[in-house]
Amino acid sequence: MSVHPFHRGKSPGFDAGGGSGDDGGMPSRLTALEAKWDAVIPTLATKADIAGMEGSLKSEIKDGAIGTQRWMIATVLSLFLGFGGLFLAMSNYSKGSTTAQPTIIVVPSTAAAQATAPAASRP
């Protein structure tokens, strides 16, 4: 890039090489930008397009919020029940074995009962 000295009272033109970065190709650059502009503008949404989408967008946002709220409530309830069950299990475990030991009843077999039975009852 060349630097031009400043001349008092004299302003170099835009296309006159006044150090503005113009290399003489400004008209072709503007034509390319205008072509891109003309290609993009028809694809942008209009006010009518946005107004038509407003109702469906609001309902989708509301449905998403309700779904998220349901998941949060279900998660909180399941955590509450899970920690409650854990608390009960740990409190029962920490009490130790305070229940009475079971009573063991021994039933004699029938052969041993017949051997000890009186002889009068035998045929």
Image (tube, rainbow, N blue to C red):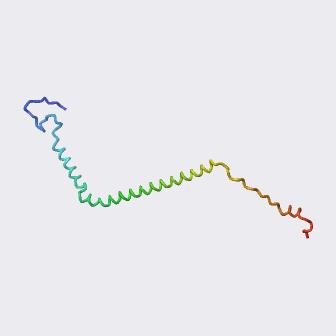
Q: Residue at x 20, y 52 (%)?
A: 38
In this picture, residue 42 sits left or right of residue 10: right
Q: Position of residue 7 (x, y in %)?
A: 9, 30
Outermost residue to the right: 119
Query: For residue 120, which quarter of the picture?
Result: bottom right
Q: Position of residue 64 (x, y in %)?
A: 38, 57
In this picture, residue 39 sits left or right of residue 105: left
Q: Position of residue 69 (x, y in %)?
A: 42, 56
Outermost residue to the bottom: 123
In this picture, residue 18 sits left or right of residue 119: left
Quarter of the figure that contains the N terminus: top left
Quarter of the figure that contains the C terminus: bottom right
Outermost residue to the left: 9
Q: Residue at x 13, y 34 (%)?
A: 18
Looking at the picture, tell me which residue is in the foreground, 2 or 103: 103
Q: Position of residue 93 (x, y in %)?
A: 62, 49
Q: Residue at x 76, y 56 (%)?
A: 104
Looking at the picture, tell me which residue is in the foreground, 7 or 31: 7
Q: Residue at x 79, y 58 (%)?
A: 106
- As drawn, 10 above or below 59: above
Looking at the picture, tell me which residue is in the foreground, 100 or 2: 100
Outermost residue to the top: 5
In this picture, residue 6 sits left or right of residue 122: left
